[in-house]
């Protein structure tokens, strides 16, 4: 089990409990990068639980073949129920999330909402599927990272946790940075440049060199709108639909 070093210091942090059949997968990511920073700054408490600890029999079995036949294995209900019920006996949870290709598409607004919660459970799927009774009785939200299948829920879990903790105030050195990222305003972010102002005949837009803040913000807004129109016109369609609802 991977845990934060001193749980007592995380009284006001978000707590995330991750359930996985390969908990060692999380060792390096939790000790490096943004997730490590969030833990060290006491903004996030992350625990990874080995589902095999709740497995059946001598070999701690967690999966079995599907009724009706077919390829692949299915995670049994008993270990998952035992693990989640043990966690719920200690505290309440805002959401119990299952990561699955047929879930709701993960969006920035979800990450923002989760960042304001206190306790989350993330169940990582593995093998072919999980028993449907788990989904019907324990899961409160099912999330997909896109129209693609990976070998398990561990990579999507890291994706979700990173997106959530980075918008918690104090995690990033510059808290405004997260608020100006793509999707926070419903649009893609604008383009950015840094020194030198001229590189191999390629010049930075003149307005960015003027120091005129209102003109710069106007340029960035227009640039973000144009990038969104070119790259993700569907986002503009969604914004139009939202305005019609109001």
Image: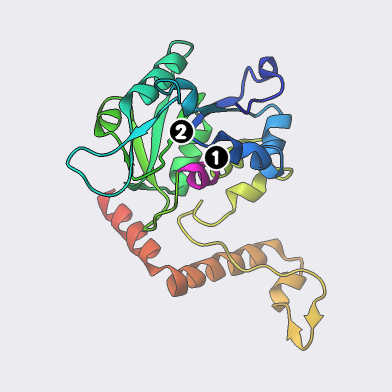
Q: Residue furthest front?
A: 58
Quadrant of the rendered image containing residue 37: top right
* The magenta segment: 153-160
* CA separation in Å, label 1 and label 2: 9 Å
Q: Residue furthest left?
A: 68
Q: Earlier in the sequence, mark 1 or mark 2?
A: 2
Task: Find numbered disc 1 in the image and state the secondary structure of the residue it sits on.
Answer: helix
- Is residue 199 something one can see in this rendering? yes
Q: Say whether residue 209 is left or right of residue 142.
A: right
Q: Residue furthest top?
A: 89
Q: Position of residue 243 (x, y in %)?
A: 32, 54
Q: Residues within 10 Å of mark 1 (few under 14, many from 20)?
A: many
Q: Residue furthest right?
A: 196
Q: Position of residue 145 (x, y in %)?
A: 42, 51
**Placement of 50 over or under 85, stated as above or below:** below
| Label pair 1/2, CB-CB below 8 angstroms | yes
Quadrant of the rendered image containing residue 13: top right
Q: Say whether residue 231 is left or right of residue 132.
A: right
Residue 83 is labelled as: none
Residue 122 is labelled as: 2
Residue 161 is labelled as: 1
Q: Can residue 196 be found in the magenta stretch?
A: no
Q: Which residue is depicted at the point 69% across and 77% down?
A: 205
């Amino acid at each position: 089990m991977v845990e934060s070093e001193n749980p007592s210091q995380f009284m006001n942090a978000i707590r995330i409990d991750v359930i996985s059949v390969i908990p060692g997968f999380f060792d390096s990511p939790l000790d490096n990068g943004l997730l490590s920073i969030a833990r060290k700054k006491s903004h996030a408490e992350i625990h990874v639980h080995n589902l095999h600890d709740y497995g059946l029999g001598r070999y701690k079995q967690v999966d079995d073949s599907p009724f009706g036949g077919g390829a692949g294995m299915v995670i049994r209900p008993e270990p998952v129920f035992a693990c989640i019920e043990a966690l719920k006996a200690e505290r309440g949870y805002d959401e119990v999330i299952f990561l699955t290709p047929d879930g709701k598409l993960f969006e920035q607004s979800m990450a923002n909402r989760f960042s304001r919660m206190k306790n989350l459970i993330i169940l990582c799927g593995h093998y072919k599927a999980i028993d449907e009774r788990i989904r019907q009785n324990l899961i409160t939200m099912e999330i997909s990272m896109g129209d693609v299948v990976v070998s398990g829920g561990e990579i999507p879990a890291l994706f979700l946790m990173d997106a959530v903790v980075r918008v918690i105030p104090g995690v990033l050195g510059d808290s405004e940075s997260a608020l100006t990222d793509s999707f926070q305003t419903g649009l893609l972010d604008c383009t950015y440049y840094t020194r030198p102002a001229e590189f191999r005949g390629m010049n930075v837009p003149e307005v960015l060199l003027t120091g005129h803040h209102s003109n710069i913000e106007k340029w960035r807004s227009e640039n973000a709108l144009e990038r969104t129109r070119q790259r993700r016109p569907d986002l503009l369609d969604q914004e139009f639909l939202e305005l019609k609802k109001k």
